[in-house]
């Protein structure tokens, strides 16, 4: 029983191994290389077939032309003999050398039987070699190969340099057909050899120039799909200047950018989790500060009464921002709650909220009409403008100036934040609004401009840089009114 089980197990393993080999062979035959090899052989063979048929037809013509030449030489030998008298043996030898049954010399007014067997032959078909059109020759060659019986044919050809004379020979077609078949076989094997050699050369060339690089591209894509975070799976461009080289370089750029984007997303996800936890605890701390500020509001000191409303408003905004951050960690930034409000008081709040070091002075130029209104989410526009103004103040040196202007054009509200700082470096412009990438200052996160643009785009608007140089920078917010 154990031996039988062993035999069954070995047979099963052998079957699996055979199936594995068959799968490998199947993959080879389905590969681009194998398809290319077979198609090349097929196309070369088709081209050889187009050459094969005319070649056989012209071989038949040359065969008959040589028979006519031999018959002409035999006729000249007979004409050179005294009274055209030769022995029977010599005539038989001449007919054998010519390979014909009879030879007839024809002139304009007469016909002379030069050589002939004792018994006249019954002619099955006649051919005139003066008709040398390609279609006619191919048709006659096909008829000779397709007819099964041994025909006796008559062949007539004009004599060179004697346009009024011709030679006519009667011969068996069997030797001609046998010679044509031998020639066809040689042509077939030669064509097959040429096809195989050409196919192999084309295959090796295309395999080296096309298939192998495509295999590298495919392997790099598969490896990147499996481990996109591993920089070792990046394809190394070969330096080629053709389409394959372009594809290699573009694939490398795409892999690098995708890996960077994945790392950025992971960074954002980790940061979002941390910010959510911090915001939760910060909201509790700010709630305590809010209670303390309410107590301060009960004091009668004029200076306290002047400062406390701004302090309470700032704490309320901080608490709301923490609450929104906690919501963002779960679902996303809330949709704008639009209402119409005056823009000038909002900008004054932004100016008061921009914290400056004691060593830095800043001038504000507010060019907004007291009656200018905006239809938007007041709190979100406040956050967007606060980010823009805070970035501008951090970029300014001593005696810096920030100008905020607003106007309406054809139903579009345009707000401009301008400064006289050193401008944005050209290196930072490409990723200016991307978080963790677009920061201009050292140690910055680049979140301010990213948040500002996100809030503006949520309103259906746009935030962009209109101008930046060594004389200053202009940010523009466009909002549908």
Image: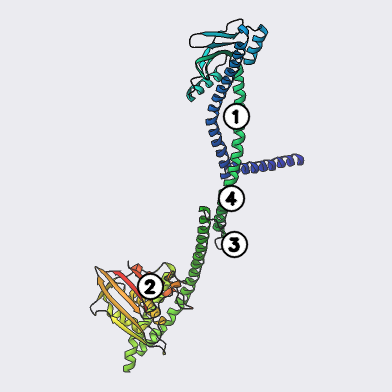
Q: Earlier in the sequence, mark 4 or mark 1?
A: 1
Say if 165 sits above or below 240 in the image: above
Q: CA distance from mark 2 to mark 1?
A: 79 Å
Residue 297 in sight here: no
Are discs 2 and 1 less than 8 Å apart at CB?
A: no
Q: Residue furthest top?
A: 118
Say if 319 sits above or below 119 in the image: below
Q: CA distance from mark 2 to mark 4?
A: 49 Å
Q: CA distance from mark 4 to mark 1?
A: 35 Å
Q: Secondary structure at mark 2?
A: helix
Observer-side mark, 2 or 3, equals 3
Residue 386: image tag: none
Q: CA distance from mark 2 to mark 3?
A: 37 Å
Q: State the residue position of label 2.
A: 452
Q: State the residue position of label 4.
A: 212
Q: Residue 147: x, y in percent?
A: 55, 17
Q: State the residue position of label 1.
A: 187
Q: Earlier in the sequence, mark 2 or mark 4?
A: 4
Q: Residue at (56%, 41%) from the top-left corner? A: 35
Q: Residue furthest front?
A: 82
Observer-side mark, 4 or 3, equals 4
Q: Which colouring convention does the figure follow?
A: rainbow
Q: State the residue position of label 3.
A: 232
Asked whether 127 or 377 is in front, the reply is: 127
* Quarter of the figure with residue 429: bottom left
Asked whether 264 or 34 is in front, the reply is: 34
Q: Residue furthest left?
A: 371
């Amino acid at each position: 029983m154990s031996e039988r089980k062993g035999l069954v197990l070995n047979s099963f393993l052998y079957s699996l191994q055979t199936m594995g080999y068959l799968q490998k062979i199947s993959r080879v035959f389905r590969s681009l290389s194998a398809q290319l090899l077979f198609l090349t052989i097929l196309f070369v063979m088709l081209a050889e077939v187009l050459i094969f048929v005319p070649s056989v037809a012209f071989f038949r013509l040359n065969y008959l032309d040589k028979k006519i030449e031999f018959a002409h030489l035999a006729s000249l030998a007979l004409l050179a003999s005294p009274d055209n008298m030769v022995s029977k043996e010599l005539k038989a030898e001449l007919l054998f050398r010519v390979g014909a049954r009879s030879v007839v010399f024809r002139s304009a007014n007469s016909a002379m039987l030069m050589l002939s067997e004792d018994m006249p032959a019954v002619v099955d078909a006649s051919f005139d070699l003066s008709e040398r059109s390609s279609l006619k020759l191919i048709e006659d060659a096909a008829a000779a190969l397709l007819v099964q019986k041994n025909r006796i044919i008559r062949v007539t050809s004009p004599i060179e340099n004697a346009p009024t004379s011709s030679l006519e020979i009667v011969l068996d077609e069997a030797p001609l057909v046998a010679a044509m078949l031998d020639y066809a076989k040689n042509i077939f094997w030669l064509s097959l050899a040429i096809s195989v050699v050409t196919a192999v050369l084309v295959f090796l060339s295309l395999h080296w120039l096309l298939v192998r690089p495509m295999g590298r591209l495919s392997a790099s894509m598969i490896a990147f799909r499996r481990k996109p975070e591993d920089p070792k799976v990046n394809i190394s461009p070969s330096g080629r200047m053709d389409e394959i080289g372009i594809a290699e370089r573009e694939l490398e750029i795409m892999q690098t950018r995708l890996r960077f984007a994945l790392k950025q997303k992971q960074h954002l996800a980790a940061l979002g989790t941390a910010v959510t936890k911090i915001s939760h605890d910060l909201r509790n701390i700010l709630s305590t500060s809010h209670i303390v500020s309410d107590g301060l509001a009960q004091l009668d000191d004029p200076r306290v009464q002047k400062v406390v409303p701004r302090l309470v408003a700032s704490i309320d905004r901080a608490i709301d921002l923490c609450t929104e951050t906690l919501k963002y960690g779960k679902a996303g930034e809330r949709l704008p709650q639009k209402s119409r409000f005056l823009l000038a008081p909002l900008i004054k709040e932004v100016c008061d909220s921009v914290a400056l070091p004691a060593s830095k002075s800043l001038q504000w130029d507010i060019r907004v009409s007291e009656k200018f209104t905006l239809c938007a989410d007041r709190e979100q526009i406040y956050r967007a403008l606060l980010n823009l103004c805070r970035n501008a103040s951090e970029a300014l040196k001593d005696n810096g100036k920030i100008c905020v202007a607003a106007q309406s054009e054809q139903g579009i509200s345009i707000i401009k934040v301008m400064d006289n700082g050193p401008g944005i470096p050209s290196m930072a412009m490409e990723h200016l609004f991307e978080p963790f990438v677009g920061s201009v200052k050292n140690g910055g996160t680049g979140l301010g401009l990213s948040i500002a643009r996100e809030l503006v785009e949520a309103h259906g608007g746009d935030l962009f840089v209109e101008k930046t140089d060594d004389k200053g920078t202009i940010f523009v917010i466009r909002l549908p009114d």
